[in-house]
Amino acid sequence: MLRKTSTACLITVLALAGTTGCAEAKPGERVRIQNFSLDATEVTIGQFREFASAVGLVTAAEKAGGGYEWDAGWQLRPGWTVYRPYGREPSSPDEPAVHVTWEEATEYCRWRGGRLPTLNEWRQAAFTEQRANPKDGFERGRTYPYPVGETPDGMNTNRPDAWPVHAPAGTTRRGVNGLYDMGGNVWEWLADRRDDQALTAGGSWWYGPPQTMAEAPQWKPASFSAVYIGFRCAYD
């Protein structure tokens, strides 16, 4: 597995905001984007465990004995599941819920009273600042090239940063509309389907900044569960 060189988040200069450090959000917080709301962070292991326990869900990765990682081709990693994303206990229950299929993500959002966001909603939320009184140096009505602003600094990508793999929810740089990890950290399932494929957006810690941009979503098999793919929910 690719690992990144780490630097300290607290000394990373956030040029756009003119500040240092990484503001944090709590899992479960929602951000209003015009006529819908969106989870401020990616759904976490702790949140998904609550859902699975309530409905009696055994995930596809658990049934298969593990989830997938890329290593000169997709490799099944025994014991890698949403609860043990790298085959061991996570450092925090606030790590993103990965090794989750599109259908499992859809069921979770429905259980929460929501749904997966569409590509249009994701783009609207990730790149165009819509708050009446934006924070962190963002300007209302402005569309940015990256979900964190004019530069990719502060996202969890394959560039040197504080996170060798995925980061716990709400610990990277707060971005456009007060959202976290709309770019980087883990790919996110979207509502859009094409036969047996579903769309993902945002890139991940394994990719570079270009995959976090508005035109970079990728189609993946909807039944796929991998260490790079998570999700968040939208609410009408």
Image: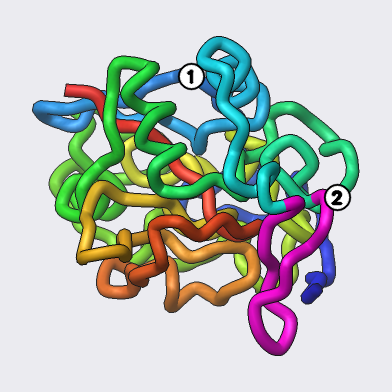
Are there few (<14), some (14-19), or many (20+) residues within 10 Å of tag 1? Answer: some
Describe the element under mark 1 as helix, strand or loop: loop
The residue under label 1 is: 28
Quadrant in the picture for the C terminus: top left
Q: How many marks?
A: 2
Q: Position of residue 110 (x, y in %)?
A: 32, 23
10 lies left or right of 232: right
State the extent of the magenta-drawn residues as a range: 65-79
The foreground one among 63 and 5 is 63
User: Which quadrant would residue 192 be assigned to in this image?
Assistant: bottom left
The foreground one among 15 and 2 is 2
1 lies left or right of 218: right
Q: Position of residue 86 (x, y in %)?
A: 81, 52
115 lies left or right of 96: left
Question: What residue is rendered at 48% in x and 19% in y?
Answer: 28
The residue under label 2 is: 87
Q: Residue furthest front?
A: 63
Question: What residue is rendered at 43% in x and 27% in y?
Answer: 108
Does residue 154 appear in this view? no
Quadrant in the picture for the N terminus: bottom right
Describe the element under mark 2 as helix, strand or loop: loop
- What label sits on residue 10 in the rendered view? none
